[in-house]
Image (cartoon, grey):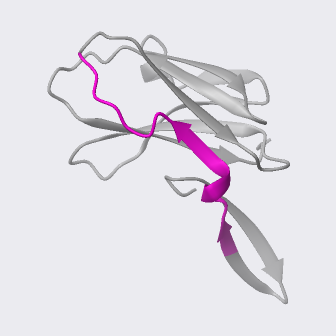
């Protein structure tokens, strides 16, 4: 998955390549500064047929890792255990999702990303 969107795998003539679909995934607002404990709602939407999952990630400034917060698959949200009391994920993975939270670490810079994916079994 690309942090700005998602990829679709295509196989033709035995060759495998990835096609970026990031222009079909949109996150709003694109950027913002907030005070600690002010409620924040981010929205992610996509227009990719047959993609039924929207995933949410966070990246702390200075860290290369993208940490999965959770996702909504079809209309069923799932949050990683370490984030269940910090984030609320809602929506429909086929079209849009929201991520709600209150920042709790003053002075920290965190970037949030969303991605769309085909539903995995």
| Residue 103 image-quadrant placement | top left
In the rendering, at what x and y percent does residue 51 appear? 78, 46
State left or right for residue 46 relative to residue 12: left
Q: Residue at x 76, y 44 (%)?
A: 120
In the rendering, at what x and y percent does residue 85 appear? 44, 10
73 or 32: which is nearer to us? 32
| Residue 93 image-quadrant placement | top right
| Above or below 117: residue 81 | above
Q: In the displayed image of the protein, which residue is found farthest to the left?
A: 107
Q: Is residue 27 magenta?
A: yes
Please state the extent of the stretch shown in magenta in the rendering.
18-35
State left or right for residue 49 relative to residue 117: right
| Above or below 57: residue 35 | above
**Quadrant of the drawing holding the C terminus:** top right
In the rendering, at what x and y percent does residue 86 appear? 42, 14
Q: Is residue 121 magenta?
A: no
How many numbered marks are there?
0
74 or 47: which is nearer to us? 47
| Above or below 91: residue 50 | below
Q: Residue at x 35, y 49 (%)?
A: 65
| Above or below 51: residue 23 | below
Q: Residue at x 29, y 10 (%)?
A: 37
**Quadrant of the drawing holding the N terminus:** bottom right
């Amino acid at each position: 998955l690309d942090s700005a969107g998602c990829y679709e795998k295509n196989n033709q003539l035995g060759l495998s390549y990835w096609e970026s679909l990031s222009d079909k995934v949109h996150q709003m607002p694109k950027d913002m500064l907030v005070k600690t404990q002010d409620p924040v709602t981010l929205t992610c939407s996509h227009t990719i047929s047959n993609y039924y999952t929207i995933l949410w990630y966070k990246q702390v400034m200075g860290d290369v890792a993208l940490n999965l917060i959770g996702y909504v698959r079809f209309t069923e949200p799932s949050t990683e255990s370490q984030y269940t009391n910090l984030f609320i994920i809602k929506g429909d993975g086929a079209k849009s999702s929201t991520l709600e939270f209150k920042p709790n670490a003053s002075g920290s810079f965190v970037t949030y990303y969303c991605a769309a994916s085909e539903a995995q079994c």
